[in-house]
Image (tube, rainbow, N blue to C red):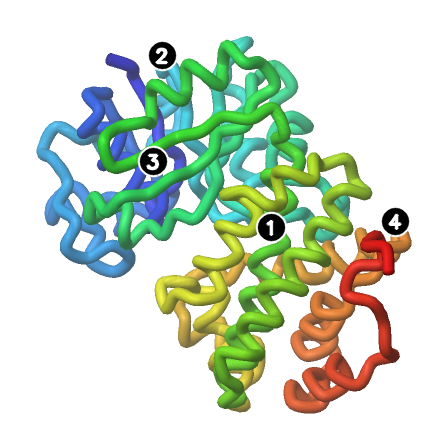
Amino acid sequence: MSKIGVIGAGSWGIALANLLFKNGHNICVWSIDENEIKMLSEKREHEAKLPGVKLPDEMEFTTDLESAIKEKDLLVLAVPSPYTRSTAKIMRPFIKKGQIIVDVAKGIEETTLMTLSAQIEDEIPDAEVAVLSGPSHAEEVGRGLPTTVVIGAKSEELAHKLQKTFMNEVFRVYITSDRLGMELGGSLKNVIALAAGIADGLGYGDNAKAALITRGIVEIARLGEKLGGAPQTFMGLTGMGDLIVTCASMHSRNRRAGILIGQGKSMKEAMDEVQMVVEGVYSTKAAVALGKKYKVSLPIIEAVNAVLFHDKNPREAVNELMIRENRFENAQVDW
């Protein structure tokens, strides 16, 4: 049995806390929000973000960050991606050398263009940082529905250790050394999911959705490989797999926000209505900046950026994607 601190009490943090408790581990969940911790302690359920998932009496909840971190075998960092760096900064005084931190959010920092694991290592250089990602909506993991994810780590020994910690009969875990490719796939798919939602909101059909998913993974892989990710990663669970579920499911906050934007709401109105952090909005500017820096063509991602931040009409953005210059689907395939 391991002692595990879950830093962040949103839907994903709570779902993983419940999973890890059922795997036999001792769990302490931290949130900065006193009302959230009071509700979890008294109700044994996150009524707002994960209703219906009952939490055991033995699970601890606290606003004391030091107690959530101290003497823990590993930490699960489950705060929304815009708060990863700031949370890592306040965690640092309590972290021991070699502390294992598993980041489970998805995003790229707009100002530095750093992945989340790089941000954590920047703030907590003594930590051993791993990443958990894949097609895994908290709503389904919380209910114990079959789910498959990937853990990426710098060492194979750590990857195997974490695989055993998280895996059970309904939560299958693969491992990989390509942490960078995992993180890029998990971040960029949120931008494509916004595009898929916008298309849904405009009333477009399955043909458009299939095209966005397929051409979206091309853009993700094109940029990801340029930055050093492995091609196989983008065709796997943390690339194509995560993209499919995020573009297709109403559990996806990115798709839901996109639908609202396609229906005519502003980005802020859409985010307010979803009532959760829409991580694709935060990753879009970073993705466009990476494309420019590495001279990679990202037409779908650039169109989403224009709609979100430059008042581009969504219907016009789709039209411009459709009438771009003629080209091969895959220039590497011989005639």
Please name the residue that numbered disc 2 is placed on.
Answer: 71
| Residue mark closest to the camera, 3 vs 4 | 4
Give me the disc on residue 258: none
Q: In the visual, does 169 lie left or right of 159? A: left
Who is closer to the viewer here, 304 or 226?
226
CA gap, disc 1 to disc 3?
24 Å
**Residue 41, quarter of picture:** top left
Give the structural element (helix, strand or loop) at label 2. loop
Q: Which mark is residue 187?
A: 1
Which of the two discs, 1 and 2, labels the residue nearer the N terminus? 2
Q: CA distance from mark 4 to mark 2?
A: 42 Å
Mark 2 neighbour class, 10 Å CA radius: few under 14, some 14 to 19, many 20 or more: some
> Does dot 4 land on a helix, a strand or a loop?
loop
Q: Is residue 320 visible?
A: yes
Pinpoint residue 173: horizontal percent, then vertical percent: 39, 30
Disc marking residue 30:
3
Q: CA distance from mark 1 to mark 2?
A: 31 Å
The reply to whether the C-beta atoms of the residues labelled 1 and 2 are less than 8 Å apart is no
Please give the name of the residue rendered at 54% of the width and 90% of the height, measured from the top-left corner: 264
Residue at which label 4 appears? 294
Sequence order check, earlier mark of 1 and 3: 3
Q: Which of the two discs, 3 and 2, labels the residue nearer the N terminus?
A: 3
Q: Amino acid at mark 4?
A: Tyr
Whole-angstrom CA distance, mark 3 to mark 2, is 15 Å
Task: Give the SS element for disc 1.
Answer: helix
Give the residue drawn at x 74%, y 76%. Answer: 306
Q: Residue at x 58, y 32 (%)?
A: 89
Amino acid type at mark 1: Ser
